């Protein structure tokens, strides 16, 4: 069986080849992103393997169906980039990797918080230039700060444990309440209450019609002045223009984003020799209190191994005619 991989980087190829044992799949690795213009590259494949910025809209799904593709294997957890309804209508199954390493993303979230707070990126550069001054590097204790966590699924729960260990007061918000969270003494509160009380707000819910622009200007107005906002979920969870206004007014004191609404045109590529045409990210990059990482929350060795292992297990189940355990349903 031929499997075509879209949007691959050298590390994807390495980890999938490392775990390609006991199977006779033909693996084709492409650097191209899946779009309406590149979908024909899937010709001859029964399965395709895609990542976060591949665009599987209705038109792409129909073209995949015409090419006789029967399985879409997402090598990520989020599936907001796939028209699941269209896939079902075309009888194409969709599988994903629901939890490859919640620790990777939760720990990256902490790294962003610590960098913004203690300004280690600035200290590193200063000291290398023999500037040993501390002016401008003042941080705050995380101990006893109130941290709001939206979404206490796999990643949100690990993040709660980490912040709990640091002595933070945590408030959670999720339509599904977890006993493990409540056992840590973390209360679930209405979203409005969380917005008005937290010093740090971290987003760990999926992007869907309900959560798109969860953080907009009306919500920002409810927040504490100087709040730290961290988004490692999906770019569309925040209205970036409203956040820029919040940064300019000082309402938002710090912003850390690992995901960005228009990241598909930017992330996972070296554009250092090019002119960035996206004025929104260009503006964001000018703020001294904004930290942007290019969707690297997942990027640990353990996560890459688990992504490859689970993806192959998903495909093997499909080939064996079993119902894939990690199937995405409407
Ligand atoms: P999960 O499915 O285990 O947890 C998501 C949680 O969000 C669930 O408990 C769900 O009930 C909750 N939720 C849904 N709608 C909500 C709402 N309106 N308000 C509050 N909570 C809501 O997912 P997991 O594995 O924890 O991942 C969370 C998100 O993180 C993914 O959807 C993905 O977008 C993102 N992600 C980012 C990565 C990165 O590299 N930056 C890597 C992996 C995931």
Image (cartoon, rainbow, N blue to C red):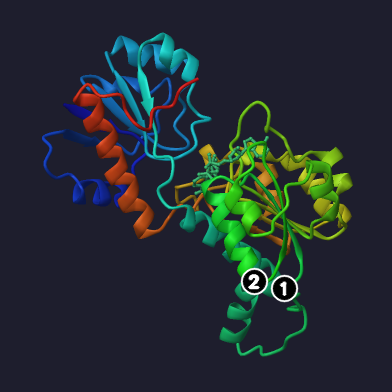
Asked where in the image residue 133 lies, by quadrant, the reply is bottom right
Please tell me in which quadrant of the rendered image residue 238 appears.
Answer: top right
> Of residues 237 and 198, which is closer to you in this image?
198
Q: Position of residue 112 (x, y in %)?
A: 61, 62
Indicate left or right for 262 with 199 as reference: left
Q: Is residue 79 left or right of residue 49?
A: right
Relative image position of residue 37 (x, y in whole percent):
40, 21
Question: Which element type, helix, strand or loop, lies under badge 2?
Answer: loop
How many badges with numbers are in the image? 2
Q: Which mark is residue 166?
A: 2
- Left/right placement of residue 273 relative to residue 156 reads left
The quadrant of the picture showing ligand 1 is: top right
x, y percent for residue 114: 64, 69
Which is nearer the eye, 325 or 60?
325
Counting residues from the N terminus, which is met first, the one under dot 2 or under dot 1? 1
- C-alpha span from label 2 to label 1: 6 Å
Task: Give coordinates of residue 175: x percent, y percent.
Answer: 67, 36
Q: Which mark is residue 58?
A: none
Numbered disc 1: secondary structure: loop
Q: Looking at the rendering, in which quadrant would you find the N terminus? A: top left
Residue 258 higher or lower than 165, as above or below: above
Contact (Cβ within 8 Å) of mark 2 with mark 1: yes
- Tell me what residue is drawn at x 78 percent, y 42 percent: 191
As drawn, 160 above or below 43 = below
In this rendering, does residue 9 appear at all?
no
| Residue closer to the observer: 222 or 10 | 222
Residue located beneath label 1 in the image: 143
Near mark 2 (Cα within 10 A), the count class, few <14, some 14-19 or many ≥20, is some
């Amino acid at each position: 069986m031929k499997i075509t991989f879209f949007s691959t980087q050298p590390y994807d190829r390495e980890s999938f080849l490392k775990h390609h044992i006991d199977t006779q799949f033909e693996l084709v690795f492409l650097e191209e992103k899946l779009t309406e213009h590149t979908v024909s590259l899937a010709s001859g494949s029964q399965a395709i393997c895609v990542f976060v910025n591949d665009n599987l809209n209705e038109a792409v799904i129909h073209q995949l169906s015409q090419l006789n593709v029967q399985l879409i294997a997402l090598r990520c957890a989020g599936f907001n980039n796939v028209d699941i309804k269209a896939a079902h209508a075309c009888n194409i199954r969709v599988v994903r990797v629901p939890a490859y390493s919640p620790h990777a993303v939760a720990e990256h979230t902490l790294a962003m918080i610590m960098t913004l707070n203690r300004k280690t990126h600035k200290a590193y550069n200063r000291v290398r230039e023999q500037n040993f001054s501390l002016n401008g590097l003042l941080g705050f204790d995380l101990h006893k700060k109130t941290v709001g966590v939206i979404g206490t699924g796999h990643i949100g729960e690990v993040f709660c444990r980490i912040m709990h260990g640091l002595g933070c007061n945590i408030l959670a918000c999720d339509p599904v309440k977890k006993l493990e969270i409540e056992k840590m003494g973390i209360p679930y509160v209405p979203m409005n209450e969380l917005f008005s009380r937290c010093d740090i707000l971290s987003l760990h819910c999926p992007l869907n019609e309900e959560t798109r622009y969860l953080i907009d200007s009306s919500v920002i107005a409810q927040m504490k002045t100087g709040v730290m906002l961290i988004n490692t979920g999906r770019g569309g969870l925040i209205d970036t223009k409203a956040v820029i206004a919040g940064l300019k007014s000082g309402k938002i004191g710090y912003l850390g984003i690992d995901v960005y609404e228009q990241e598909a045109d930017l992330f996972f590529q070296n554009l250092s020799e090019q002119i960035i045409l996206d004025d929104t990210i260009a503006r964001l990059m000018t703020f001294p209190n904004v930290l942007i990482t290019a969707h690297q929350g997942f990027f640990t060795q353990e996560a890459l191994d688990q992504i490859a292992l689970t993806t192959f297990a998903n495909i093997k189940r499909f080939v064996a005619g079993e119902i894939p355990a990690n199937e995405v349903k409407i």
